[in-house]
Amino acid sequence: MAKPGKGTITVTINGSAAMGSEGMTLLELARQSGIEIPTLCHHEELSAIGSCRICVVEVEGARTLVASCHTPIAPGMVIQTHSEKVLAARRMITELLLASHPDSCLVCDKANRCQLRHVATDLEAAQPQVRGRKRCYPIEDVSPYIKRDLSKCVLCRRCVAACREMAGQNVLHMAYRGFNSKVVVDTDRPLDKEVCRDCDICVNVCPTGALSLVEESGSKKKGKPLFIKG
Amino acid sequence: MPEANIVLKNCGVIDPARLDSYLAEGGFEALEKASGAMTPAEVVAEVKASGLRGRGGAGFPVGLKWGFTRQAPAEIKYVICNADEGEVGTFKDRYILEGDPFGLIEAMAIAGYAVGAGRGFIYLRAEYHFLKDKLAGAITQAKEKGLLGGFEIEIYEGAGAYVCGEEMALMESLEGKRGEVRYKPPFPPSRGLWGQPTVINNVETLMSIPRIIKNGAGWFTAIGTEKSKGSKVFSVSGDVGKPGVYELEMGSPLRELVEDLAQAQDTKAVQMGGATGRLLPGAMLDTSLDFENVLGAGSVIVYNSSRDMVDIVHRNLEFLAEESCGKCAPCREGTQLMVVVFKRILAGKAKERDIEFLKELATTMSLTSLCGLGQAAPSTLLDSLSHFEDAYRARMKDIAGAVT
Ligand SMILES: Cc1cc2nc3c(=O)[nH]c(=O)nc-3n(C[C@H](O)[C@H](O)[C@H](O)COP(=O)(O)O)c2cc1C
Ligand code: SF4
Ligand code: FES
């Protein structure tokens, strides 16, 4: 734990006092204190995105829950990271993401490396109670290196940020609106050799099976084992 | 209470194309007073003392916002007038822009002086393109007369998205990007347009400023209720005899607006504040119009007994699903799923658990969405479930017990 000094902020997290430095996010402080908060759009090497809302926590006095990955700590904050209210919200958001996600987990190459499945397993979120619309796009395999299966995209936008911030390119963008939002190349054309240097940075940050290397299919299924909590 | 005449004082009185007619009504005296006889800090203090709150929907104290922006350490600051007026059933800003463009310009210049901003933008709703030349003409006339003291005002036209009325999405759009919400904090007074401290206010909010500066905060606080000072301009539409724009003192009863002025009869429900607003049953017409009770952006849509509330809520949800920017998961997926469930209700196929699910979904959307759209998207749904359960029951067989 950081020593008290200039720029040190003290907060209460799940009933215990914790100290962090100015500019630190709630998520960073929680992790430093050994508290695990699930995330989906957050990536340590990328600037905050704030799109998935899985990382919400309860802050006393706030009108809504707040996303821990982009909210800076402030002196005297009283934070609950695993209250019933928080867990119910995280579970519902996960269910929403599963509702529009294809039911193809059993045959998906991402298998037990899928972060959506990790989050769902961890939260004990099941199939949604109500049937919704699925997101359906044809698989894009024009590029000899990168395969895009956007039906599996959870719209976290990590790939967009990674292309811009890590690869220094701007190949990927958001297009359309609402439920039809989509990560596109150019004016929504297939990803091909012309525009993409296939550095595969986007593939590495994708939490689901939406982006994969063509050669990878079926060959790499190592990952965290899934377990069902009793 | 009689109709008020504060914000709309000049509408229909002056010739909006001629600066001299505005000057003849005492125009630009407030700016002269502010920049001549008051320090910027005094202007902010006066606005704070007036208790003026934002008219764009959220009701945030204007003086506080200006104070934060004034104190933010930065060379460059901006003032934005939110003229996106996208809320369903609002047309009061349009009436103001058409009738009193100089008043808005004067108010923006006062805001610029108060917070230390040299540049202002009017973010004009795409559908109000026909007002652009009129506004630009007003700016040019005021500038040529040297009335703005170097304060620059530009007009920026939106592209037709509802969410771009939300302040963060508006700034993204103004910066030339995709109109999508940014997370907060940082808030605009510390980091707004192009990362600089920014004051953003609704058209109607700004219109009260010159009056407050000229007549003093004490004059303004005498009007309205304890927590809602001044007047409010309403756009009334729907099943009424006389739809239109009405200005009333804060705290007036809804009945006066809907029945006496707009001449509604047989009112079943009133939708206050548009698609993300509240749905009040006819029995609640004595509610007073203020921030303490119900206000929103001033959109008042009246429904008579021939209307079906399930249809109305369905239309609201369809609208919001269409207009969701799609950035955050709860709103993007939630609005869509609500529409799907409503389709089932309309087809007579809904089950009790669908209603329970809608309520749980509503809670999560309100608690976790990134902006006001997703947070308030379920509000007409929840109101309809508490006030018009019969409408749902009529559509479903086994709903008994689900609706409270
Ligand atoms: C989805 C959404 C749409 C909005 N649309 C408008 C709008 O059209 N006009 C407006 O003035 N404020 C709108 N707002 C409110 C603005 O975000 C902001 O609160 C307002 O411009 C602040 O000005 P005020 O304090 O003067 O009300 C909207 C908010 C949301 C969440
Ligand atoms: S609440 Fe809706 S409109 Fe607002 S940021 Fe989220 S997706 Fe966009
Ligand atoms: S991890 Fe914080 S919003 Fe996605």
Image: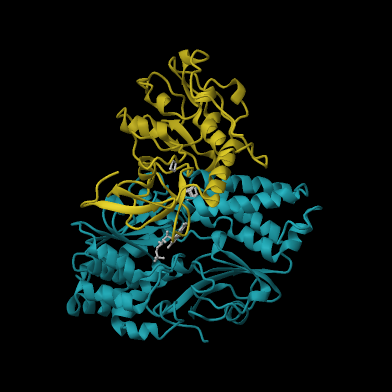
Chain colours: A yellow, B cyan
* Left or right for B271, reference B219: right
Residue B68 against residue B219 in the figure, above or below: above
What is the tally of numbered marks visible in this picture? 0
Q: Is residue B185 visible?
A: no
A227 sits to left or right of B392: left
Identify the residue shown where x is 22% and y is 72%: B41
Q: Residue at x 51, y 60 (%)?
A: B87
The spot of residue B110 in percent (x, y) is 26, 71
In the rendered image, the quadrant that contains the C terminus of chain B is bottom right
Residue lying farthest to the right in this orientation: B397
> For this rendering, which residue is in front, B183 or A34?
A34
Q: Residue at x 54, y 52 (%)?
A: A85
Horizontal and vertical percent position of residue B43: 25, 75
Q: Please give left or right for residue B240 compared with residue A219 in the image.
A: right
Residue under the point 38% across and 83% down: B221
Nearer to us in this view, B44 or A76: A76
x and y, in percent, of residue B86 in the image: 48, 58
- Above-or-below relation of B356 to B265: above
In the displayed structure, does residue B203 sit left or right of residue B340?
Answer: left
Where residue A155 appears, as percent x and y from the top left, is 48, 36
Residue A73 shows in the view: yes
